[in-house]
Structures are given as structure tokens and as C-alpha cells.
């Protein structure tokens, strides 16, 4: 009996593959919904560099230098429970197909267009007794780090009436007649297995920031990063110049955000969004950032020998890290400061007293000199008549004095004579003072 060709077998069994697919359940394609993979609360001191870790190896972008061999499908056969599985056939997305056992060459076939239409079913042209067992269809995407597997159990029978396909609740079971062809169904039409060279345009990462009290839907965009190298910065100017992501983020899969230096106004909720539309990756990592006060540095310890640390380098002033803070320092006054102020007051008071004494002495000296100058001027004034009648002293008006001689310093002879007459016991002598004064004045 001549067996039909492989292309004819694909056409004959196409309807059967669709029927088996409907009864075999879902194909296990990944969903494209985004999810929060981590949420953490972090705290950093003000003035330091804060780093929010956001890493994913699935976001690493590498060019296809292996001729699109990053996607591969292979079929394995497990002979019995717990037995080792052996590789039957594999095929890369470039179209290269490889059969491992010499007896299976030409007997096991995969569709050359599998990575275009998503049909990775295995065709066995003539079923043999040794083909019975558990088959697994394995899909690997090394670029997107995706691994999917589908199990199909093959049973060999000699009764054509017993040939059928059904779902046992865990996997597909196919009963095939010995010597007849059998199609082990494995279909996955997700775009990640059928498209190529689209990952660069569909790969993006961005950071969002929510100030305290702001909901997630009103978050501010900080950065947009694309695998093509384009970058866009948003956010307020005071924060835009202090945030950064590594230039090789897509080469290492590290999209960590650094804030340097950190300020108290930077508190809030930060979100790292990773979108790989080609690989179906949509992840979000949430960080609740809290800014604390900088830790106070302990004072430098002095060396034990001389009591001073000349060799130690003074550390940075922690108050300088707070650029917009004002610190008021009140230094208590010591006892030496009190005595210094008291000395200033006493010296000022003593200077004032000396100045006052000088003024008093100068005033008295000026007054005394004025009296002497007035007497001399009166004695030397020419042509002035002096009426000495007023100096006549009545005898009865004068009081008796003691007879002892009193040595007095008189300024003129007239007063001296008057004093002698007053002390003399002789009767008063009438003296014409005007005449005597004129005599003296004419001499």
C-alpha cells in the first residue's frame, strides 16, 4: 500500500487537527494584562543617593545574530512513567529542522511554516508499536524567556474502530491504528511565536511619581525609555536634573532609578513600568519612598597622647546637606564674658569721673585768677577818684579787740593803718584820708 505524500496528509488531517484543538482546551498562551510584581517601602537619608531597583532579564534587548534561532520547538517522547525522555525532532524559527534518530528520518515531519501560522503539530507517517507513549511539544523563546509545553498521549491499536481522540482532563489522548498516519496536535498562534523583528519598536520602560496624597491615575511621568535609544524626561525641573537611569539599561535589563542628591520634597510613590509588547511582558514595580533626616556623625576621637587629633580629617558638616534649612544656634554666655562687660562699664565710669574733676578744678582756678586780676586793675586805674570817706570807722561802732599783735597781710597801707588804729588804745586821730591818698597817688 502506497502511503500518501506529506502535503496530502496535512490537507487530509487538517480538519482533524482543528477538532482535536477544540477539545484539547486552551493552548496556554500568555495574557497581556499588566500586573504588580512587587511593592516595597524604602527610606533614604536626605542628601544621599537613592536607588530604586527595577530589574528584569526579560527586558534585555539583543539583536538577532543567530539568524532568528531564538525561537525553537522540539518534540520529546517519554517511554513510561518515570522513564527518561528522548529528543525526537526540533526546529528553529529560521526553518532548519533536525531529526535525531536515523529510523525517524522521513517518518516524523513538522510543518515548515510552523513559525508563521503557529501550527507546531507533529506528523507520524506510519505509526509503529514503539511509538506509543507520552509526547510533549515544547516551545522556547530564548529572547523573551518564554517556555511552554503541551502533552499528548499516543496509544497504538489494531482495531480501526478504536481509533479516536479525546481529552482526559489533563491532556489529549490519541488512539491511532498501527501503520496509519497520526497527527499529534500542538497549535499556538500567539504573536510572539509567529512575528519576528518587531521587539525593538514594542519595548518601552517608564517611571512615574505620585506625590503624597495623589492617586495612581494622576501620577506624574518622569522618564520614558525605548529600546531604540530614545529617551524623554518629564517632571518638575527641581527633580528632572537629579534623576537618571543607566545608559545601558536595555543591555543589562537594569532600569533602576537613581536620585542624587535626595531631598525631603522627593517623598512619594514611584512606579517602574516595563512593557515588552512583543514578548507579552507588562510588569509594574511600586516603591514607597520616605526621606529621613541625615544621621549625625560622631565627633572625631582625639589621639591619646596630646589630647588633640591633628592627624584626623574633619568630616563633612551634616547641616550642609540640607540646602534650604536654617539652623539657629544659641551659645550660652560664660563667666569670662560677664567680667569683660563689667570691666568696660567700670572703665567708662572712671573716665567720666576724671573728666568731671578736671572741669571742676579748671573752673575754680579760673575764678581765683579773675579776682586777682580785678584788684590789680582797680589799683592801677589812672585818674579815678576814690572816696575813702566810706572807710571812716566810728569809734563807737568798733568792738574792742585784744591787745596782742596780730600779724596780718594787708594789700595796702590804708587798711593797715585802719587796723592799727582799731587796736591802738590811743584816742582816735582825725586823718584826712583823701589828702593822704592824693599824696600817695601823686608820688
Image: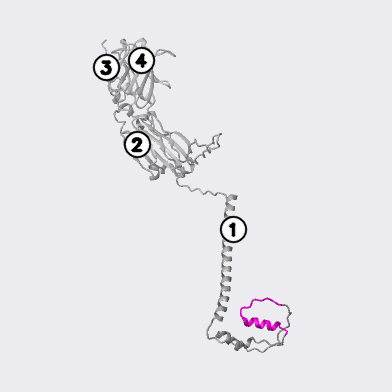
Q: Which mark is residue 6?
A: 3
- Numbered disc in front, either 2 or 4: 2
Residue 342: where, in percent of width, then height?
Answer: 59, 55
Is tag 2's residue or tag 1's residue first in the polypeptide sequence? 2
Mark 1 or mark 4, earlier in chain: 4
Q: Which residue is mark 4?
A: 87
> Which stretch did the figure color magenta?
405-425
Residue at 43% over, 35% down = 51
- What residue is pinned by disc 1? 346
Neighbourhood count class around disc 4 (C-alpha, 10 Å): few under 14, some 14–19, many 20 upward: some
State the SS at label 3: helix
Q: Residue 415 in the image: state x and y as whole percent.
A: 64, 81
Q: Nearer the viewer, mark 1 or mark 4?
A: 1
Label 3 neighbour load within 10 Å: few <14, some 14-19, many 20+: some
Residue named by callout 2: 225
Q: Secondary structure at mark 4?
A: strand
Amino acid at each position: 500500500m502506497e502511503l500518501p505524500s506529506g502535503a496530502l496528509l496535512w490537507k487530509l488531517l487538517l480538519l482533524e487537527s482543528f477538532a482535536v484543538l477544540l477539545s484539547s482546551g486552551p493552548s496556554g498562551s500568555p495574557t497581556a494584562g499588566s500586573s504588580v510584581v512587587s511593592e516595597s517601602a524604602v527610606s533614604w537619608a536626605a542628601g544621599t543617593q537613592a536607588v530604586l531597583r527595577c530589574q528584569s532579564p526579560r527586558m534585555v534587548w539583543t539583536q538577532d545574530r543567530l539568524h532568528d534561532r531564538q525561537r525553537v520547538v522540539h518534540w520529546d517522547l517519554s517511554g513510561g512513567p518515570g522513564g527518561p525522555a528522548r529528543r525526537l525532532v526540533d526546529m528553529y524559527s529560521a526553518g532548519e529542522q533536525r531529526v535525531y534518530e536515523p529510523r525517524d528520518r522521513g517518518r516524523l515531519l513538522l510543518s515548515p511554516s510552523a513559525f508563521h501560522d503557529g501550527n507546531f503539530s507533529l506528523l507520524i507517517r506510519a505509526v509503529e508499536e514503539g511509538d506509543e507513549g507520552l509526547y510533549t511539544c515544547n516551545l522556547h523563546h530564548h529572547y523573551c524567556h518564554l517556555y511552554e509545553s503541551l502533552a499528548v498521549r499516543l496509544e497504538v491499536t489494531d482495531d480501526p474502530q478504536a481509533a479516536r481522540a479525546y481529552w482526559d482532563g489533563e491532556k489529549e489522548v490519541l488512539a491511532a491504528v498501527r501503520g496509519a498516519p497520526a497527527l499529534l496536535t500542538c497549535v499556538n498562534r500567539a504573536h510572539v511565536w509567529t512575528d519576528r523583528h518587531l521587539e525593538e519598536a514594542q519595548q518601552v520602560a517608564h517611571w512615574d511619581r505620585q506625590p503624597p496624597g495623589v492617586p495612581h491615575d494622576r501620577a506624574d511621568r518622569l522618564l520614558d525609555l525605548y529600546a531604540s535609544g530614545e529617551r524623554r524626561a518629564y517632571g518638575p525641573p527641581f527633580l528632572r536634573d537629579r534623576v537618571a537611569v543607566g545608559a545601558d539599561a536595555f543591555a543589562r535589563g537594569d532600569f533602576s532609578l537613581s536620585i542624587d542628591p535626595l531631598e525631603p520634597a522627593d517623598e512619594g510613590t514611584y512606579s517602574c513600568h516595563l512593557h515588552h509588547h512583543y514578548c507579552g511582558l507588562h510588569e509594574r514595580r511600586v516603591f514607597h519612598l520616605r526621606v529621613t533626616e541625615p544621621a549625625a556623625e560622631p565627633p572625631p576621637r582625639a589621639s591619646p597622647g596630646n589630647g588633640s587629633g591633628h592627624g584626623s580629617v574633619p568630616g563633612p558638616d551634616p547641616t550642609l546637606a540640607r540646602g534650604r534649612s536654617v539652623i539657629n544656634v544659641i551659645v550660652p554666655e560664660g563667666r569670662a564674658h560677664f567680667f569683660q562687660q563689667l570691666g568696660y562699664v567700670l572703665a567708662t565710669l572712671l573716665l567720666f569721673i576724671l573728666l568731671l574733676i578736671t572741669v571742676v578744678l579748671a573752673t575754680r582756678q579760673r575764678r581765683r585768677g579773675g579776682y586777682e586780676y580785678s584788684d590789680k586793675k582797680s589799683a592801677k586805674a589812672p585818674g579815678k577818684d576814690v572816696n575813702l570817706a566810706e572807710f571812716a570807722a566810728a569809734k563807737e561802732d568798733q568792738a574792742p579787740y585784744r591787745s596782742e599783735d596780730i600779724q596780718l597781710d594787708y594789700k595796702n597801707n590804708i587798711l593797715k593803718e585802719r587796723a592799727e588804729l582799731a587796736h591802738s588804745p590811743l584816742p582816735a586821730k582825725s586823718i584826712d584820708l583823701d589828702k593822704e591818698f592824693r599824696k600817695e597817688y601823686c608820688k
